[in-house]
Image (spheres, helix red, strand yellow):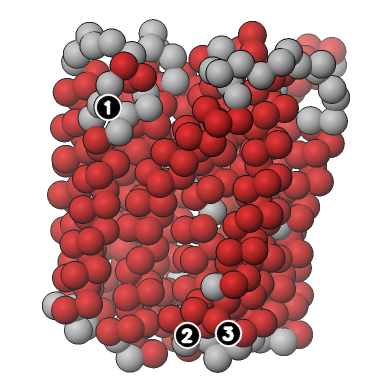
Amino acid sequence: MALTKTKIQGFLHSGGSIAVAMAIMSVATYGFTMVAARLLGPRPYGAIASLMAVLLVVGVLSLGLQATAARRISAEPEHVAQIERVIMAVTYRAALVLGLVLLAAAPLIDRILRLHSLPTAAMVAATAVPLTIMGGQAGILQGERRWWPLGVLYVASGVPRFAIGTALMAWRPTETWAMVAVLIGSFVPVLIGAYALRHDRSPAEDTALHGQVAILRETGHNSQALLAFFTLSNLDVIIARNVLDPHEAGLYAGGLILTKAVLFLPQFVVVIAFPSMSTAAERRRSLLRSLGLVAMLGVACTAGVIVLHDIAMIFVGGDKYAAIESKLWLFAVLGTALSMLQLLVYAVLARQGRLSTYVVWVAVIALVGLGLTVADTLTGLLVIVSVIDGLLLAALLGFSLWRLGEHSPTPEAAPTA
């Protein structure tokens, strides 16, 4: 009995617990989207899908803070107390500023997404505040490799949303009540994160290395790199609402449920690998092993969709979305490419590269230009998105292999690829 208890405790405090926690989070997150697709139908679901896409994009500040905290703590664990204090100070201020900016932008969000509901658009601003705070908390736990509390935080970011969302949408099947569920659920992980970080550490005074200015500068770089990736991976659903009729746009959003599932399924690999990719000694091996694992998971998912396409249709909303059944494997391939792109972007952040992020922005510009001018059908838009993402994947992989093959000075010495 004692041996079994020891094994369980060892697992809970290992990286394996993150895989389980993020699997639960992913199931809950996509449970929410599947319930929304079924209860709301294509038109309202297209609206909630576009709102969630906006949240993913504005959430790059949260992820930027997380990456900054995790990288700095992993690279210099002896300064964890100072980094934690400064990160949280920056996090609270950033959350407030972002919330106010998004509140001012609510009329623009309402108009672009054609919501016809200003309160619904304003909930994006309210949700962004706890979402940003969670990023700072998660980064500290990730950098310290405290996998058990980090796993609990991830579970709390998905399960409450699913439970509350199912109840509210069953009662009032509208995009507004779906967003209310998202807002309420976003506060749960923040409370858990605050509890996990409740102990004071009596940090030393700020230094130039880990002062607020330095952390703000790195967070800005990380956030803009992640903004480029999440803009690229979520822009197509917004383009769809502007170039396709509402029904086709809803069908496209339904197919993206599968894409996002394949994208986020191997996210635990990124979380576990990032601290290792932040240290020069482990960087190359960690990236190559992680890329191989992500690719294998993507291939397995795509093969599963081809063989079990009837079951896959259940996950994208059922018979209402039957028109995209023959294209589901393409949505799975797109998700695989995006999951590998995400890992490569984090590898760039781990070594604090600069030039590679510009290539992602070029892909964003290409998607906007071609998506708005060339795509006029669901299939046409899907092909354009897949080709652009595939070319970007090849470019970033080439940059990364080139940099890993060099023995150059640290990234801080000069901008790198």
- Sort mark 3 into few (<14), some (14-19) or many (20+) by Cα contacts within 10 Å: many
Look at the numbered disc 3 and give the secondary structure of its residue.
helix
Q: Amino acid at mark 1?
A: Pro
Residue closer to the observer: 371 or 72? 72
Can residue 152 be seen here? The reply is no
Frontmost of labels 2 and 3 is 2
Task: Tell me the SS state at disc 1.
Answer: loop
Name the N-terminal-most of marks 2 and 1: 2
Q: Residues within 10 Å of mark 2 (few under 14, many from 20)?
A: few
- Position in image of residue 135 (x %, y %): 62, 42
Location of mark 3 (residue): 40
Q: CA distance from mark 3 to mark 1?
A: 47 Å
In this orientation, does residue 353 appear? yes
Instruction: Determine whether 357 is above or below 258 in the image.
Output: above
Q: Residue at x 22, y 55 (%)?
A: 363
**Amino acid bearing label 3:** Leu
Residue 6: name its quadrant. Answer: top right
Cα separation between marks 2 and 3: 21 Å
CA separation in Å, label 2 and label 1:
39 Å
First in sequence: mark 3 vs mark 1: 3
Residue at (24, 35) in percent of width and height: 355
Q: Which residue is mark 1?
A: 415
Question: Is label 3 in contact with label 1 (beta carbons under 8 Å)?
Answer: no
**How many callouts does the rendering have?**
3
The residue indicated by pointer 2 is 111
